[in-house]
Amino acid sequence: MTKPLGDVAQFKVSIDSLLEKRRYFVSQVLPQLVEGQDFYVIKNKKSLAKGGSEKISSIYGYTASFEQDKDVMKSLDSVRGIVCFICNLSKGNQIVGQGRGASTLAKNDNDPNKTIKMSQKSAYIDAVIRTSGLSDIFTQDLETMPLSAIAEIPKQEDYSEIEESIPTRQQLTAEDLRDQNAITEKQKAFLESLIVERVASSEERERWLAEANSGLSKWDASEMISSFLMAK
């Protein structure tokens, strides 16, 4: 029978090891993540993106697998076109963490493939944050945050009209494809107004405005707009 003191000593060693690993991660790994690519900073909150999740997952040696979240889909069967996935993260043959994500056809131009990918992306990011114990550092990707976290959109702005002005990839002509980097004027004006309204730091605001005027594509602009709209 193991002595209680031995259990306490072993526990302390385990905790010290975990804390040391976390200190090393924060000091050595986080600086390697690229803002605007691996994560976004809006209103002083770091939002983990898919690129950052993949880097963290690779560092920890996680392998991701996905399965339909049938229980959640059943409980939300009144939500039209909803797709839900569970992401399991494994090391070797052992599942070490899990995350959930959902998306709807309506939010993705009724494109089934895009809806599935967005749902899996949400589940993947959720799983990485939970499994790695980084919820105090990162929030989930802003475009997949729950509806309750969406900030009120200014009444004078009509975001749906901007969304409708962005063609789907299936609708693009050959000329459009040659000019993918042309952000629309309406997108640009709306994005600039969001930056001015929602970024408190003048230095950070100037950086975002410069980014908005750096030749974004329609797709990059749309993603950035979504991120600001979903920020708390």
Image (cartoon, grey):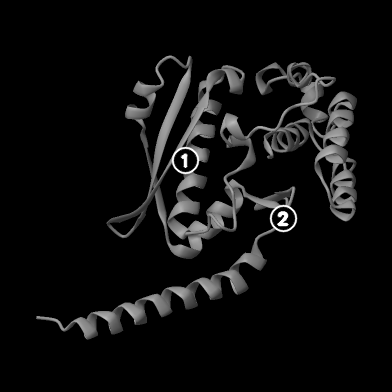
Whole-percent x, y for residue 81 in the image: 48, 17
Whole-percent x, y for residue 90 in the image: 35, 54
Determine the residue positioned at 49% across, 46% down: 126
**Left or right, 22 with reference to 204:** left
> Residue 36: which disc?
none
Determine the residue positioned at 86% across, 26% down: 184
Q: Is residue 81 above or below residue 57?
A: above
Seen from the viewer's position, the closer of residues 197 and 94 is 197
Secondary element at tag 1: helix
**Residue type at the position of mark 1:** Ala
Whole-percent x, y for residue 6 in the image: 22, 85
Q: Residues within 10 Å of mark 2 (few under 14, many from 20)?
A: some
- Quadrant of the image containing the N terminus: bottom left
Q: Residue furthest left?
A: 1
- Quadrant of the image containing the C terminus: top right
Say which residue label 2 marks.
Answer: 35
Are the residues at dot 1 and dot 2 in contact (C-beta closer than 8 Å)? no
> Residue 123: which disc?
1
Seen from the viewer's position, the closer of residues 120 and 16 is 16
**Residue type at the position of mark 2:** Glu
Q: Does the image show residue 37?
A: no
Give whichever of discs 1 and 2 has the lower sequence position.
Answer: 2
